[in-house]
Image (cartoon, rainbow, N blue to C red):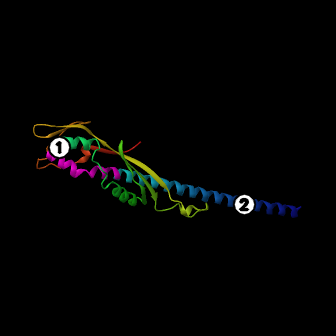
Amino acid sequence: MSRYACRDEGQTLGIYIVAVAALFFLAFAFFAVGQASVLRNSSQTAADAAALAAARGGRDGIEGKFLDALKAGDLGTLKGLLNGTGIDGTGACAAAGTYAAGNGAEVTGCPGTNSPLSYTVGVRTLGTVGKSVVKGTEDIHATSKATAVIAPRCTDVHKGPNAIIFTCTAGELSVDPTASNFKLNLAEFFSVHLSE
């Protein structure tokens, strides 16, 4: 009788070892999935930051044109800039690259569009998922895309007695570029936000 009991105990031990090994494998596999999820979130954060930086860079790239048009009282150029004409994206993709690198990624694409005026930035993480029980994860990089829009806050412009008057969503904005304390802030004229 005792001889059969020993045989049963040996079989149970084998099943126990296989079950524990399977549980460890599953735990490591779930850990790899968690690592991949963290990397994916990191790439989306990098894409969002890079797209916003590209849109701000594109907007801020017209500062000289906008200021010159203000000082000259050139309403046609100002209206054109408010409509996106003349915003050529100078500095947009360079700014996107800087922000992507700051978030552990590199830019894979930075095309701009005119309607609406926006930048869609693709990024690829510099890091990988890392080694795990799932084969090939050490070579997997996460990729993401985000689009940021440059939207005009003001729709019209006309000359006032001592200033240039912009008709904006928040009301009229009076700008006197000859004032000694004048400083151009393009955020008053254009908003930058992620596209839904």
- Whether residue 195 is in magenta: the answer is no
Q: Nearer the viewer, residue 24 or 67?
A: 67
Neighbourhood count class around disc 2 (C-alpha, 10 Å): few under 14, some 14–19, many 20 upward: few
Q: Quadrant of residue 16?
A: bottom right
**First in sequence: mark 2 or mark 1?**
2
Please state the horizontal and vertical placement of residue 105, each as a whole percent of the image.
43, 59
User: What residue type is disc 2 on?
Assistant: Val
Please state the horizontal and vertical placement of residue 131, each as a whole percent of the image.
56, 64
- Whether residue 68 is in magenta: the answer is yes
Secondary element under disc 2, as helix, strand or loop, is helix
Q: Quadrant of residue 117?
A: top left
Q: Residue at x 33, y 49 (%)?
A: 55
Q: Which residues are magenta?
A: 54-73
Answer left or right for 36 relative to 13: left
**Mark 2 or mark 1, whichever is nearer to me:** 1
Q: Residue at x 14, y 46 (%)?
A: 72
- Which residue is denoted by mark 1 in the rendering? 74
Q: Which mark is residue 28?
A: none
- Which residue is denoted by mark 2 in the rendering? 18
Secondary element under disc 1, as helix, strand or loop, is loop
Say whether residue 184 is visible.
no
Q: CA distance from mark 2 to mark 1?
A: 80 Å
User: What residue type is disc 1 on?
Assistant: Asp
Q: Nearer the viewer, residue 67 or 185?
A: 67
Please state the horizontal and vertical placement of residue 133, each as a whole percent of the image.
61, 62
Mark count: 2
Q: Residue at x 75, y 59 (%)?
A: 15
Answer left or right for 169 relative to 118: left
